[in-house]
Every structure is written in C-alpha cells, then in structure tokens.
Amino acid sequence: MFTNRARILVIGAFVIMQAVAINYKVYEIAGVTAMFILLLIWGYFKEGTIVLAAKAFHNKDYSKAEGLLQQVANPDWLSKKRRGFYEFIYGGVCLQKLDYDEAEKHYEIAAQYPLRTANDHVAALVHVANISIRHNDFAKAKAYLALADKYEEKITSKMKDVVQRLHKELDKK
C-alpha cells in the first residue's frame, strides 16, 4: 500500500537502520531489516499500487488512479488477484476518458482473472458486451453475455437488470 516513491523512502530508512545495526554488531536487527526490505521489494512486484489506485477510483479521482496504475512497471508480474483488479480499474479509468477500445481490452483481460466478487466479474463481462454492441460486434456481445449468464445466481438484482437490458438490446438488432 505504498506509492513507488514512498516504498523507496522506506527501503532507504531500513538500509540506514541495517547499516547502524551491523555497525553495532546487532545482527538480529540487521536480519529483520533485510527481511523488511525484501518484503517491500516483493510487494512492489506482486502488489503494486493497486490498493491506492482502487481508493482513488472509488473517490472518483480518475487521474490519480491512472497515475497510480501507471506506476506498475509490469502488470504481468502482479499476483492473480491484483492483476484482475488492476485491469478492472484501468478499464474503468479508460471508460471515464471515453477510450472505449482501451477499456474493452482491459475489461477482457480482467474477465480472465479472479475478481473480488461475482458481481465484479459480471460487470467486466457486461462492459465488454456493451462496448461490443456499440461497435456492432453482436457475436462477441452475445458470447460475453452468455458468460455473464452463468453467474446469474450469484449477482445482485441490479446487475441482473443490466444483463437483461443488454439481452433485450441485442434481440432488437
């Protein structure tokens, strides 16, 4: 739950503490600080800034959320749960910027990873279906809605209404 800059500052503080501990020959503390440094480095690669980006996205600060997501050097290195959430949030940011092609790409990737709830998973599928309808790719929209229908028992009534509206819109076309 650190930005990259904060992570570097904390690692710097631990390196100083480790140097002092080694200087005073307190190797136990030096070992513990080394573990904390490794934990922070591991967090950089596996956790990233996703939690902070999610908080900014929830607060509708989309530019801050995008900036935090861009701090992730390689999304492929994120853990599976974080990767799905990364793509889901990035898809939402792209939707806010009205960049539908990029949003569709991110939501497609998000649908391949586990998300927090079935509702979030269906939301990703519905976004792809909706964008596909707008691009007149009705076969793709039907395929994604069929995937969303598999979660019908696990989603909220509001999400069920959204899925039904998209089905009706597809039936008209």
Image (cartoon, helix red, strand yellow):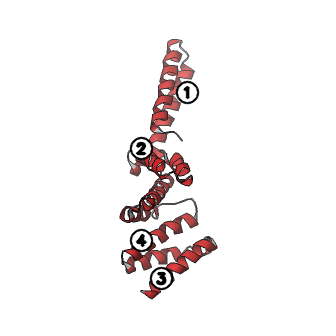
Disc 1/disc 4 C-alpha distance (Å): 50 Å
The residue positioned 36% from the left and 65% from the top of the image is 101
Which of the two discs, 1 and 2, sits closer to the camera? 2
Are dots 3 and 4 in contact, CB under 8 Å? no
Question: For numbered disc 3, what is the local secondary structure?
Answer: helix
Task: Give the residue at mark 1.
Answer: 32
Which callout, 2 or 3, points at the residue further toward the start of the chain? 2
Q: Amino acid at mark 1?
A: Val
Where in the figure is residue 83, as x and y percent of width and height? 46, 54
Are dots 1 and 4 in contact, CB under 8 Å? no
Question: For numbered disc 2, what is the local secondary structure?
Answer: loop
Which callout, 2 or 4, points at the residue further toward the start of the chain? 2
Task: Give the residue at mark 3.
Answer: 169
Q: Residues within 10 Å of mark 3 (few under 14, many from 20)?
A: few
Where in the figure is residue 135, as x and y percent of width and height? 36, 74
Disc 2/disc 3 C-alpha distance (Å): 38 Å
Q: Amino acid at mark 4?
A: Ile
Which of the two discs, 1 and 3, sits closer to the camera? 3
State the residue in front, 4 or 113.
4
The residue positioned 49% from the left and 66% from the top of the image is 124
Task: Give the residue at mark 4.
Answer: 131
Disc 1/disc 3 C-alpha distance (Å): 59 Å
Q: Residues within 10 Å of mark 2 (few under 14, many from 20)?
A: some
Using the image, determine if residue 13 lies above or below residue 76. above
Which callout, 3 or 4, points at the residue further toward the start of the chain? 4
Task: Give the residue at mark 2.
Answer: 71
Disc 2/disc 4 C-alpha distance (Å): 27 Å
Are dots 2 and 3 in contact, CB under 8 Å? no
The residue positioned 48% from the left and 52% from the top of the image is 62
Q: Amino acid at mark 2?
A: Gln
Where in the figure is residue 17, as x and y percent of width and height? 52, 20
State the residue in front, 108 or 164.
164
